């Protein structure tokens, strides 16, 4: 049995894991779910991942891993090259902090189930949902832009000249921002890193529009 990634084409958490698998050169099969149709809440998927969230990575022995950051850390530990984290402990903590600023602060309040709740239960209209999304992106991106624009550890990417854990999270978020007309001119450093990621097939292939089951 090969690796199986249970995912949704537009999920930013799925995008970051797809890009990580691609960077590591790991082949995997797709199992896709339409979140708006609650396919991820089916009994079959809940038996695999009781959290009912995508992505979930099913290993060769059938073990299922949930949560994108945990999946990427597992890939780093089991397939250390190319590295997603630097060697020095302080630098590793720095990169993890950048990644978590996106994955733990921006993404949780802007994922689909939150946006759906805003509309269906709280009566927020579509422009209001978009404003919510852009507000929380700015709350995370403004300090990230400030940090990365002056930090000497930044190279072509968030840390140095090779993409890593922080770039995976940043890339997926910027790709998702396109749906909500986020003005990236306010974050030139972040935009430049995203643009460099777009030069690499591992990232391009992970984009929602390039997913085999897009749409």
Image: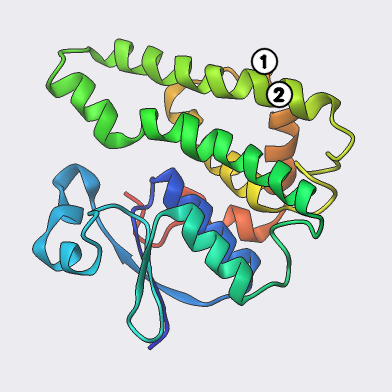
Disc 2 residue crowd, few under 14, some 14–19, many 20+, Cα 10 Å = some
Quadrant, the N terminus = bottom left
Residue 166 falls in which quadrant of the image? top right
- What is the x, y in percent for residue 118? 22, 20
Q: Which mark is residue 145?
A: 2
Q: Residue at x 71, y 23 (%)?
A: 145
Q: 158 or 175: nearer the eye?
A: 158
Q: 188 or 45: nearer the eye?
A: 45
Residue 133 falls in which quadrant of the image? top left
Q: Residue at x 71, y 57 (%)?
A: 85
Disc 1 residue crowd, few under 14, some 14–19, many 20+, Cα 10 Å = few
Residue 63 falls in which quadrant of the image? bottom left
Asked whether the residues under the numbered discs 2 and 1 touch, taking CB atoms below 8 Å apart as contact, a structural biologist would say yes
Q: Residue at x 48, y 37 (%)?
A: 104
Q: Which mark is residue 186?
A: 1
Relative side of 140 to 44, left or right: right
């Amino acid at each position: 049995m090969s690796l199986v990634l249970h995912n949704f084409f537009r999920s930013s958490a799925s995008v970051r894991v797809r890009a990580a698998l691609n960077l590591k050169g790991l082949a995997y099969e797709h199992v896709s779910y339409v979140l708006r149709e609650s396919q991820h809440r089916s009994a079959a998927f809940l038996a695999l991942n009781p959290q009912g969230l995508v992505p979930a990575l099913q290993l060769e022995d059938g073990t299922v891993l949930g949560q994108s950051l945990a999946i990427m850390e597992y890939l780093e530990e089991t397939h250390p090259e190319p590295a997603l984290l630097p060697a020095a402990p302080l630098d590793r903590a720095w990169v993890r902090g950048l990644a978590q600023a996106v994955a733990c602060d921006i993404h949780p309040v802007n994922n689909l189930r939150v946006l759906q709740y805003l509309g269906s239960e709280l009566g927020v209209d579509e422009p209001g949902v978009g404003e919510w999304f852009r507000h929380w992106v700015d709350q995370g991106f403004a300090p990230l832009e400030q940090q990365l624009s002056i930090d000497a550890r930044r190279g072509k990417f968030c840390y140095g000249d090779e993409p890593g854990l922080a770039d995976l999270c940043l890339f997926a978020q910027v790709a998702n921002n396109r749906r909500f007309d986020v003005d990236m001119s306010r974050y030139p450093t972040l935009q430049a890193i995203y643009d460099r990621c777009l030069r690499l097939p591992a990232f391009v292939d992970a984009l929602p529009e390039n997913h085999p089951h897009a749409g």
